[in-house]
Amino acid sequence: MRRKSYICNTAFAARLLLLLAALGIAGCGFQPRGQTLALGGIPSPLHVTGLTAYSPLQRELASQLDAAGASLSETAAGAAAVLRISDTRSGSRVLSVNSRNKAVEFELEESATFSLRAADGRELATEQTVRTLRILFQPEDAVLGSSREAELLRGDMRRQLVESIIRRLAAAS
């Protein structure tokens, strides 16, 4: 009889711990990766300037805004607000070298500066810079795989950069 009581108490404790963990994660604002961001008060339709039409950052921004339900305008005249993206940078620097003085570890950086103005000229979001950093390890014997990994990391960094821009726009609006 005592054994059954112990098992029930253990099962109850495990369920309670799982419930507390779920509440803790939900309470801190955790969201699964790739989840659509809420736009909040971002005006729509939105016109984006400062990026070339087919740049990877423009495509990612348009994709995420579309997924979040915002409509994009081709011209500033037909938009409720203008999102100006400026000073986009993509860079890397060597972090470490091996015994033969070859670079094996790099820091990748993506950044962009943005601001948001309403159609009537009011500034909705002041000029801000967002930045993402990642570390890339490139072993000597995996040159092809490393270049593909760098491309994937850059894509992930652009996605993170756009998510950060959208979050800041939603908070400012």
Image: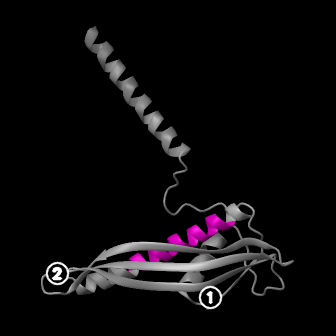
| Residue 166 rendering spot, x and y as whole percentages | 63, 68
Q: How crowded is mark 2: few (under 14 residues within 10 Å), some or many (20 or more)?
A: few
Q: Which residue is farthest left?
A: 99
Residue found at x 36% / y 25%: 11
The amino acid type of the residue labelled 2 equals: Asn
Residue found at x 66% / y 72%: 66
* Front: mark 2 or 1: 2
Q: Can residue 65 be seen in this view?
A: yes
SS under mark 2: loop
Quadrant where the C terminus is found in the figure? bottom right
Q: Mark 2 or 1 closer to N-term?
A: 1
SS under mark 1: loop
User: What range of the chain is rendered magenta?
Assistant: 152-169
Q: How crowded is mark 1: few (under 14 residues within 10 Å), some or many (20 or more)?
A: some
Which residue is at the front of the view, 146 or 172? 172
Which residue is at the front of the view, 89 or 23? 89
Residue found at x 47% / y 34%: 19
Q: Which residue is the site of mark 1?
A: 51
Up/down of 51 relative to 83, above or below: below
Up/down of 172 relative to 149, above or below: above
Up/down of 43 relative to 73, above or below: above
Which residue is at the front of the view, 4 or 127? 127
The amino acid type of the residue labelled 1 equals: Leu
Alpha carbon distance from label 2 to label 1: 38 Å
Q: For this view, does 172 lie left or right of residue 142?
A: right
Answer whether residue 161 is magenta in the image: yes
| Residue 116 rendering spot, x and y as whole percentages | 72, 75
Q: In which quadrant of the rendered view does residue 114 lie?
A: bottom right
Answer whether residue 80 is magenta in the image: no
Q: For this view, does 91 lie left or right of residue 123?
A: left
| Residue 145 rendering spot, x and y as whole percentages | 27, 82
Q: Which residue is the site of mark 2?
A: 98
